[in-house]
Image (cartoon, helix red, strand yellow):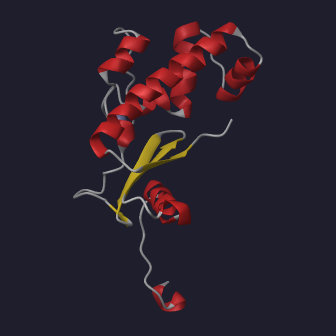
Amino acid sequence: MQRLLQRDVRMTNDANCFALSEAWEGEFRQYPVVLGLILGTGVGGGLVINGEVIDGRNGITGEFGHFRLPVDALDIMGEDIPRVKCGCGQSGCIENYISGRGFEWLYAHTYGESLNSVTIIRHYRAGEANALAHVDRYMSVLAACVGNLLIIFDPHYVGAGRWVV
Ligand SMILES: [Zn+2]
């Protein structure tokens, strides 16, 4: 590809590319530390410092979804919230609660009814009580989890991608 394009070509994962695209966006170039967060089927992101992706020694710098639930999230969801088994092999990783899947799981856990996120948001927009409480609870859990990232990285800018509803 480098030969065909006659320029340097580098590869990294989608979350790092997202963070880099945010950091290199014209109006954000002034920020030396940019954190990109993606809430999708999982949770991930990337860290860019002075225009360069920080991969870390093992290339896992942005794998924020595998942080464990913070105590503030347990206060919101209840200490007895099940520690969902994660694809990484651990239990209680935040992506199982704040991703799109986690949003649906938390609703089903709380109300005993499995609804997809589109339906939950439709109910939310219609003012349905369970959906209103659920979105409020979810946003509080999300804030508790993201708050820890802000303490660790203290970024100048946070770019956020999201799951589509
Ligand atoms: Zn995990």
Residue extending furthest toward the left: 57
Residue drawn at x 66%, y 25% as measured from the top left: 116
Could you say where residue 147 lies in the image, as x and y percent from the top left? 37, 32
Number of numbered discs on residues: 0
Measured along the vertical axis of the image, is residue 77 above or below residue 84? above
Could you say where residue 33 lies in the image, as x and y percent from the top left? 36, 55
Residue drawn at x 46%, y 62% as measured from the top left: 20
Judge left or right: residue 132 versus residue 6: right
Could you say where residue 136 lies in the image, as x and y percent from the top left? 56, 18
Q: Quadrant of ligand 1?
A: top left
Residue drawn at x 39%, y 30% as measured from the top left: 145
Q: Does the rendering let one see residue 88?
A: no
Q: Quadrant of residue 118?
A: top right
Q: Quadrant of the C terminus?
A: top right
Measured along the vertical axis of the image, is residue 85 above or below residue 48? above
Q: Nearer the viewer, residue 115 or 146?
A: 146
Could you say where residue 107 lies in the image, as x and y percent from the top left? 57, 16
Q: Nearer the viewer, residue 84 or 129?
A: 129
Residue drawn at x 66%, y 40% as measured from the top left: 164
Residue extending furthest toward the right: 126
Judge left or right: residue 77 versus residue 66: right
Measured along the vertical axis of the image, is residue 37 above or below residue 24? above
Q: Quadrant of residue 71?
A: top left
Judge left or right: residue 16 versus residue 55: right
